[in-house]
Structures are given as structure tokens and as C-alpha cells.
Image (spheres, coloured by chain):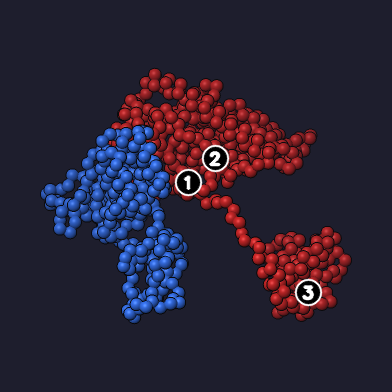
Chain colours: A red, B blue
Amino acid sequence: MKDTPMSNCERDFILKAIEEKKRLDGRQTYDYRKIKITFGTDYGCLCGQVMAQVSCELVVPKENRPNEGIMFFNLELSPMASPAFEQGRQSELSVKLNRQLERCLRNSKCIDTESLCVVSGEKVWQIRVDVHTLNNDGNLMDAASVAAIGALCHFRRPDVSIQGEEVTVYSPEERDPIPLSIYHMPISVSFAFFQQGTFLLVDPCEREERVMDGLLMIAMNKHREICSIQSSGGIMLLKEQVMRCSKIASVKVSEITELINKALLNDKTARKAGGRCGFAESMPQERITALKTDQTAVEMTDVSETASSIVQTAVAPPQTVPSPSVPVPGVGQVGEGLRNTWGLEEEEEEEEEESCGGDSVEEVTKMDVELHQEDKSRTVDVVEILDSDEEEEEVVILYPEATKKPK
Amino acid sequence: EDSSVSTERVGEILLPGDEFCCGPKDTLPLTDSGKSERLVAGPGLRRSGDRLLVSRSGVLRHKEPNKFWIESQQRRYVPAKGETVIGIVTVKSGDVFKVDIGGSEVASLSYLAFEGATKRNRPNIQVGDLLLAQLVVANKDMEPELVCIDGSGRANGMGVFGTGGLLIKVSLGLVRRLLAPRSDLRADLEQLFPCELAVGMNGRVWVRAGAVQQTLVLANLLQSCDAMTAPQRQQLFRRLQQGAF
């Protein structure tokens, strides 16, 4: 679906406003929008309009680099972000952003890939970063780079130990997962140019992006090292302009790195303290766009009377429903059921039957107690449940009270 | 249609599926003359047999003597006949302009539907221009059609916009509030500073004030007024008048 076209009047107005050093949302020319960084309960990071998720798995390494781990980046422009993005199709913008993200994070060697090696030549960790755009309000590249580096800093990979030839991967419950070793945090800063390079803006919003002449993207870390620099749109830039931009970028990058570190620290303390953390908690309540509301109290004073009156007037269960019995030591059976065609283990069949057994409240609780005791003593592969079609072939376990099977 | 309806539910929030007619009344009004009332069901109400069902969630409103409708809030515009909308010209081809009005389809506007336009004297409109036009054909089966003249052939305020000004997108509820006959939102805006406003029923508003800064202030104001109650809005306007900008 095509996006709403931009009218000439909007374009002229934005350009005129920029000439007077005014932006649509009231920011100054070098101001960033407020960045809000949140971390999820799993290893993900949400920054502004972009969400990044990191996962890992053990794979065979590349042939020419047998003792280095693999990093894989994937940026997806989902149709949720803008009606101009189509699902599945690799648009030009998506290819460009993917390439920029890879250059910024992979070529800068911000992650120590040699530490990802488990067995040289055979098994290494492959770290996969998936970035999804949630909303396109301009400057997706910066948001994507902050989200990706935040997610990588937040990520913990499972611990691995090697004894001779054996490799053991410990689950998070057995041993604490360990963080990746990150040398530095490259962050990209975008500059939009207007009127053939006369005016520049930092962090363009979506409407400003549509009228800009060209874009300069500088990826830098807080040690003032440039990791990647790219200019698109074909504008001619002077040397002084590029130098000025890199100076502005270093200031911005140190601010943003501070923000990320603070957010990581908050998340760590929240997790240690056992507090609730994650994306759901970061949503503000009681706003018109939020679906979360406080719990409302429910009137419970007359519930017990109503419940007991219902129980007393309830009809006693028919005798044809049998109570659980133990036909053979180690075997428990409740009622009859159909043959389970899902191929699940028999334990789950037992649980299904337990729930269809009792009627009234007291009987259920008694039955549960009995069943739990039976569960501990029984073995797995004993119960065969009769299917009415296979009457003659199967061995049936009957108990004394059982009536004829329903046909 | 015949129904005995109470106005007790006016102002309540109704959900789709609620029935609108009330049940049998306990008391008969003394002035019951046996005549059945006719009522006009507006947007959001739908007749099914002899019942009236609510088809949209919102607040029930009533206008004397017998008009009822559901006032709901949405941002997406569905073209309806007779409404005046602001459109952006996307394509100029042959005898027809294609104009985007924010609906599911692009509307068409003929060259001749302007005041004083003839086959030789074509209107001077470029791709990307803003237009104020009225919908003459707007249903779900056909492509919407616009005209820039009224029934008697006069422009009546419609046509191409001049230069300057900014176009913003707001919700349909705000647009209706701006266009209401005795709108206090408009009265508040008048107190601020001189400005020009063109309001399209498709959620688009064009604003122009003396200076760029004032236009920006006005645009941001309108967008934030959307979700505010009247007292909050008046507080914001007061702060503005005291020179916050």
C-alpha cells in the first residue's frame, strides 16, 4: 500500500521552517528525541520505535575462520511500522539499513568473536540479532543501532564446559549464563541535509526525512573512534561540514552510551531485587492508548452462600461414573475415555481423565488426593484404554464397578 | 419507524450489539395519543427487523425531536457523500485528476468541475497541490468522485489552496468538534492569534498564521487538543496566552 503523498504545501513549509531554524516538534537543530530504552524478560531491547532480539545456537564455523563465532544480523521493516512497507519484500530501504547495521556492528569488531568459539573447527556460537521496526517516525537507523547494541549487551549465552572430547552446554538453571564480551558500543548518528547542504538537522523525523536532500550517517563509539561513515543522497559535502558533524556525533554518542548503561544497570538491579521487569512493565498505565488497568475489586461477600446453596441443591452424581480404583498394584484408572490419538505420553492421558471424574466439590478434592498418591507409585506404560471399535483385539482392564462401555 | 424510545440512555456508552429500544414500559404516559413515533437513526445505529441495534461503540446522542446517533471516535476516514474534504493531487492524467483523500481508494476529480473552467480554460493545478472539494459519489462499490463547485456552479470556498500553511492530520472527532455550530474549541482558538483554518471532514486540517512559529504552535495545539477534556484545554490555552511561546 502506498503511503500518503506529501503535499507541496507541507514540503515548502518544512523547508521554510528549517531556514528559520524551527522544527515541527519544537526541537533545536542538534536535539535528539527523547530515547527510552527498555529491556525484556528475555534477551531483547526496545528503543523508541525499534525492537531487537538476540538468540544463539551452536553451529559449524565458516571454513576460512574456524576459531571465530558467527554474527548474523537481520533487520525487518514490518508493515506495522508504515503502510509503505510490505511484508516479505526486500525494499531498497531495507537492504540499505541491513547493510549499514552489519557494517556498523560486525566490521567494527565490537564483539569478541574468538570468545564465541567452543571447539575450533567444529562448534562455535552463532549469535543472531533480529531487529523489528514497530513504528516509522524517521531515523530508523539510529534506533536500530541503539536497540541492537543494547540487546547484545543485555544478552547472556549458556555456559559451556569442555572435558576432553565432550562438550557440555549447561541450561540457565544449572549454571548462570554468561554475557558476551563486548569491546565497545558503536552507535550511529544521522544527519539530514537540506538546501544543498546549507542546513543540517540531527535525528530527522519522518516528514523531515521526506524532504531532505541527503543523509550522512556516522557510527562512533564513546572513545571517539569512527566505526562507519556513510553518505547517501548524492549531496556534496565540504570537509568542514563532515568534521563538524563528527564532533557533534561524538557528543551525542557519549550521551546515548550513558543512557544505555544506565538502563542496563537499572535492569540488573531490578532483576536482582526480584522486581518485575520486562516490556509489559514499561507500559504506562491509565493512558488512552494503554489497555492495562488496575485490578478492580470483586464483591465476594455472598459468594460462599451462593456456592453452598448450589452445592446442596446439586444432584448427586450418577453411579455409573466410577471412582478411581486400583485394579492391579501400580495401576490407577478413572472412568473410561477414548483413545488418545495425539501420541502424548500416558501421564497426560491420566490427567485428562482425572478432570472429567468428579462432580461435586468435596468428591473432587478427595479424588485428587487419592490420585496424587497413586501417581507416585504407578509406572508409565500400563493403562490401555479401550476403544469401542477394537473390542475384540485389545486387552481390557476392568474394575468391579464398571458398567458396559458406551457404544 | 415505529418505536417507543426513551431518552434515558442518551449520554451512555453503548457497545455494538446493544439493543437500543427499551423494553415494555411500566407506566403509560397520560398523553399517549396512540400515534407511533418516527425516529431517525443516525450513524452507528442500524435497523434489524423491528429492533434497533447499535453497530458502533460510542456515546449515544440525541437531537430534538427524534434524531438519535452514536458518537464514536476514529482516525480513519470512510468517504461519505456530501462531505467537504481536503485532498492531495497525486496524478494528472487526461481529463481527470486523481486526488488522495485518505480513504481506501483514490478519488477522481474532473477538470471541468471548477468554477469558470471550460475545455480551453483549464485550472492551474500541479501534482502535490491541496484542494478543498466536495464528494458527490461515495459508496463502497464505486470509486469516490469529487467536485469543486456547488450545485449552482459557484466555488463557495472550494478549490486549490494558496501557498504557505501546514497540513496536519487529526482524528475525526476533533474535526466534528471544530465544525460544530457553536464550538467552544473554535471560540478559544479565536482568542489566540489571527489565523486561517481549513477543515476537511477526512481528518485533515490546514492552518496558516502570520509567522512560521505561530503556525507551528497552532498545529501542535490542535493535535494535542484531541485527547484533552475542555478544562485541560482551556488551561493549555491560558498558558499559551501568557506568553509560553
Toward the viewer: A385 or A241?
A241
The x, y position of residue A14, in whole percent, is 32, 35
The x, y position of residue A68, in whole percent, is 64, 31
Image quadrant assignment for residue A10: top left
Residue shown at 43% from the left, 72% from the top: B22
Image quadrant assignment for residue B129: top left
Q: What is the number of the mark on residue A46?
A: 2
Q: What is the number of the mark on residue A322?
A: 3
User: Circles 3 and 1: CB distance less than 8 Å?
Assistant: no
Q: Which residue is mark 1?
A: A78
Up the image or down, A317 lies above or below A261; here it is below
Q: Chain of mark 2?
A: A
Q: Is residue B42 visible?
A: no
Q: Chain of mark 1?
A: A
Residue type beneath disc 1: Ser
User: Circles 3 and 2: CB distance less than 8 Å?
Assistant: no
User: Label 3 neighbourhood size at 10 Å, few (<14), some (14-19), many (20+)?
Assistant: some
Same chain, labels 2 and 1: yes
